[in-house]
Amino acid sequence: MNTRLNDIIPNSMNQGKRETKKNAKTGKQEEMKASQKQLMLTDSMRSMRSMSSEPTGGESEMLAELRKLRQENSESFKDTKLSLNRLESSMTEIKQQIVQLDERITTAENRVSATEDRSIRQERAVGYLESSGERLV
């Protein structure tokens, strides 16, 4: 039984070493494949860049349209900004006018209140004078 155990242990150790070597070889192969794919991708990107650096007639028209649209967009942005500034200034003016009108309303309400109080006092005075005049007559 002891010999049998010794036979099994070295075989399993040798098998582990073989698997490690096998894994190392496959790992290297996978790295080589990955690097080849990377090279192919970079080459294709370079070729695409070289193609795109030479615009064709349709591409140059599209680029010209894009430039025109960009310019129109910037002009409309400037117009919008100017309109917004005008709107903000008119809003501040309106707020100032509202504040002034509120002040005028409060002063008018105070005047009306004072006038009503005065008329009430005058009515009382007239009533008193009439009653005292009737007593005299």
Image: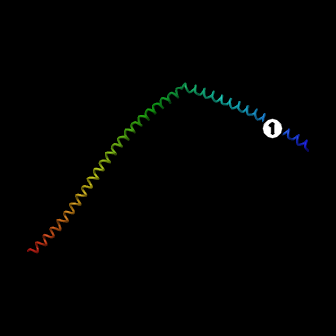
Tag 1: Cα neighbours inside 10 Å, few (<14), some, or many (≥20)?
few
Image point (70%, 32%), residue name: 31
Left or right of residue 14: residue 54 = left
Against 130, residue 24 (above or below) is: above
Left or right of residue 92: residue 121 = left
Name the image quarter holding residue 53.
top right
Image point (66%, 30%), residue name: 38
Against 95, residue 70 (above or below) is: above
- Residue labelled with disc 1: 16
Provide residue 104's location: percent of width, then percent of height: 26, 53
- Amino acid type shown at disc 1: Gly
Image point (68%, 30%), residue name: 35
Image point (60%, 26%), residue name: 46
Left or right of residue 108: residue 63 = right
Provide residue 39's location: percent of width, then percent of height: 66, 28
Against 59, residue 15 (above or below) is: below
Q: Quadrant of the C terminus?
A: bottom left
Against 130, residue 5 (above or below) is: above
Provide residue 74's location: percent of width, then percent of height: 43, 34
Q: Quadrant of the N terminus?
A: top right
